């Protein structure tokens, strides 16, 4: 992953990305493990600033339009980030995702078959469905945001000790999909066949 990391750092400079755009790229990088909780918290906090919010959200949606099948990990990690921001970010994140729900729904048809014939897109489809269901359930969304705030307050109370004992690392940002421990194929179908039929869902 070192080569890709160097490429991404160079691209960040060439494209003149803002600090928050660079952080989104870091959180949705090609490595087969999740972004750190610390980084996602920082991005969630930044959504309360309008300028940072305007940098963060379009950068995430851009990941969903990536036409290179070898970059599907970034699509999945962008969904993880969106879900985290919906639960822990500013209220405007919820409204913005609702306004862009079509592109999230599109990912419910995502397919990526690796060289071993395994459909590595299943995690993307599942995460997309979870986000759509959450956005459409106001009561559950309120509870998740309330829970996130409570956990945040608890985390802040133990922040110093948590760093020393290993909390706040990437493990707490991973879900049960097995994404963090899987080795993913990077070859497969092109954009059209990855998403299958874009209608419905």
Image (cartoon, helix red, strand yellow):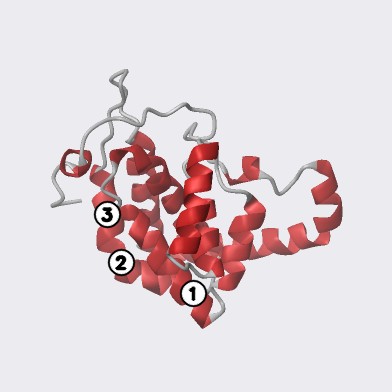
Question: Which of these two is toward me, 170 or 74?
Answer: 74
Numbered disc 2: secondary structure: loop
* Residue receiving disc 2: 100
* Residue receiving disc 3: 105
Decide if residue 158 is on the left or right side of residue 73: right
- Distance from label 2 to label 1 (Cα)? 15 Å
Expressed as whole percent of the image width and height from the top left, the position of residue 170 reads: 63, 43
Decide if residue 172 is on the left or right side of residue 181: right
Q: Is residue 23 visible?
A: yes
Extreme-top residue of the structure: 116
Q: Nearer the viewer, mark 3 or mark 1?
A: 1
* Residue receiving disc 1: 53
- Distance from label 3 to label 2 (Cα)? 9 Å
Expressed as whole percent of the image width and height from the top left, the position of residue 52 reads: 52, 75
Labelled pair 2, 1 in contact (Cβ < 8 Å): no
Q: Residues within 10 Å of mark 1 (few under 14, many from 20)?
A: many
Numbered disc 1: secondary structure: helix
């Amino acid at each position: 992953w070192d080569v890709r990391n160097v490429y991404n750092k160079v691209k960040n400079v060439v494209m003149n990305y803002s600090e928050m755009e660079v952080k989104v790229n870091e959180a949705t990088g090609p490595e087969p493990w999740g972004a750190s909780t610390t980084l996602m918290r920082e991005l969630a906090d930044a959504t309360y600033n309008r300028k940072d919010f305007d940098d963060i959200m379009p950068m995430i949606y851009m990941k969903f339009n990536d036409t290179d099948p070898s970059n599907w990990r970034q699509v999945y990690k962008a969904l993880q980030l969106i879900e985290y921001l919906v639960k822990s970010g500013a209220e405007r994140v919820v409204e913005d995702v609702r306004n862009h729900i079509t592109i999230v729904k599109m990912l419910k048809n995502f397919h990526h078959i690796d060289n071993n014939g395994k459909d590595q897109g299943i995690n993307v489809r599942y995460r997309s469905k979870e986000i759509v269901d959450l956005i459409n359930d106001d009561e559950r969304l309120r509870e998740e945001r309330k829970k996130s705030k409570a956990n945040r307050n608890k985390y802040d109370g133990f922040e110093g000790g948590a760093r020393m004992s290993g909390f706040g690392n990437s493990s707490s940002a991973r879900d049960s999909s097995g994404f963090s421990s899987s080795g993913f194929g990077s070859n497969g179908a092109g954009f059209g066949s990855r998403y299958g039929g874009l209608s419905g869902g």
